[in-house]
Image (cartoon, rainbow, N blue to C red):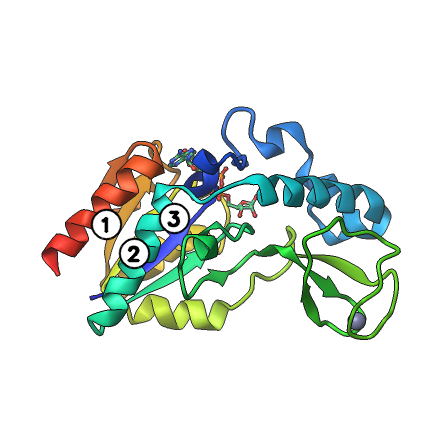
């Protein structure tokens, strides 16, 4: 069986990392236009670096939850049975990897990496990042940015994602509001390609009506139950 899983901020919510559009979410407290666009970074790099440094420090304190662990287990079992779990995440955290997932496609980038705007090299980066830091590869200073996809920029690995979407049997969205494209359109692509579709979320997302199957509740409870049911059918 080949499964395409798309995760969003709700998958990491119980690990203490904020979501974006829930009550009190990140975009209720911070303005995405002044913090998560290329124009914002050009205008005030220090403010944008400070925002991502805060989120990176929070991430280093966070731990994966049972939803991350269950998805890593399912990916391992499916790969042993000649199936597969293509794990695509909108999240910039590394909690899927820290829970043991072997393949994770970060379509919105990764918080624990920096990208050089001069040489394009991406470098693991756990400390605070700032304008004065030097690129470890080309030694330019002032050319490092968070390796995160901002509003108005093209998500990463879209060709790989498209091909995985068209070769799976089941599409599952976990912990995402279905508010941001292209990720929000994946379920329609999946349905047109003949995949079964399933939503696992705290509450109905904006595109809940497109999903054939739906499970609601906290991911750390709903995802392990869903994984056990899939494993029982293998
Ligand atoms: N378990 C399951 N789902 C949850 C939980 C939880 N404990 N807590 C919240 N949710 C659900 C919410 O109901 C909501 O539908 O997770 C979803 C989070 O939605 P958003 O905050 O919009 O996050 P996401 O869908 O990942 O946002 C997509 O928008 O701002 C950009 O780049 C950012 O990747 C992000 C993208
Ligand atoms: Zn460089």
Q: Residue furthest left?
A: 233
Residue located at (31% from left, 49% from top): 70
Contact (Cβ within 8 Å) of mark 1 with mark 2: yes
Disc 2 residue crowd, few under 14, some 14–19, many 20+, Cα 10 Å: some
Q: Residue furthest top?
A: 23
The answer, for residue 16, to whether it is visible in the render is yes
Query: In this figure, what is the number of numbered marks?
Result: 3
Contact (Cβ within 8 Å) of mark 2 with mark 3: no
Disc 3 residue crowd, few under 14, some 14–19, many 20+, Cα 10 Å: many
Residue located at (75% from left, 57% from top): 145
Nearest to the observer: residue 10 or residue 158: 10
Q: CA distance from mark 1 to mark 2?
A: 8 Å
Relative to 221, 31 lies left or right = right
Q: Which mark is residue 227?
A: 1
* Residue 18 horizontal/vertical position (percent): 54, 35
Nearest to the observer: residue 120 or residue 211: 120
Relative to 70, 132 lies left or right = right
Residue located at (18% from left, 53% from top): 230
Nearest to the observer: residue 70 or residue 8: 70
Place residue 225 in its image quadrant: top left
* Residue 219 horizontal/vertical position (percent): 34, 38
Contact (Cβ within 8 Å) of mark 3 with mark 1: no
Disc 3: which residue = 68
Query: Which element carries disc 2, helix, strand or loop?
Result: helix
Nearer-N-terminus badge (3/1) = 3
Q: CA distance from mark 3 to mark 1?
A: 11 Å
Disc 2: which residue = 73
Query: Which element carries disc 1, helix, strand or loop?
Result: helix
């Amino acid at each position: 069986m080949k499964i395409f899983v798309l995760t969003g901020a709700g998958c990491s919510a119980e690990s203490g990392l904020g979501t974006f559009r829930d009550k009190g979410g990140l975009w209720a407290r911070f303005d995405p236009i002044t913090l998560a666009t290329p124009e914002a970074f050009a205008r005030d790099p220090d403010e944008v670096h400070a925002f991502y440094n805060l989120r990176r420090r929070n991430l280093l304190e966070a731990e994966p939850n049972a939803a991350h662990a269950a998805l890593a287990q399912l990916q391992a079992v499916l790969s042993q049975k000649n199936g597969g779990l293509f794990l695509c995440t909108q999240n910039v955290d590394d909690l899927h990897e820290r829970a043991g997932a072997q393949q994770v496609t970060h379509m919105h980038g990764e918080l624990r990496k920096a990208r050089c705007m001069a040489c394009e090299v991406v470098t693991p980066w756990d400390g605070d990042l700032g304008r004065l830091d030097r690129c470890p590869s080309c030694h330019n200073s002032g050319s490092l940015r968070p390796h995160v996809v901002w509003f108005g920029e093209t998500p990463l690995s879209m060709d790989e994602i498209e091909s995985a979407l068209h070769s799976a049997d089941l599409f599952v969205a976990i912990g995402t509001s279905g508010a941001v494209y292209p990720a929000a359109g994946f379920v329609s692509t999946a349905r047109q390609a003949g995949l079964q579709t399933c939503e696992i979320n705290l509450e109905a997302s904006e595109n809940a009506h497109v999903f054939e199957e739906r499970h609601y509740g906290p991911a750390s409870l709903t995802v392990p139950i869903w994984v056990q049911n899939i494993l029982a059918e293998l």
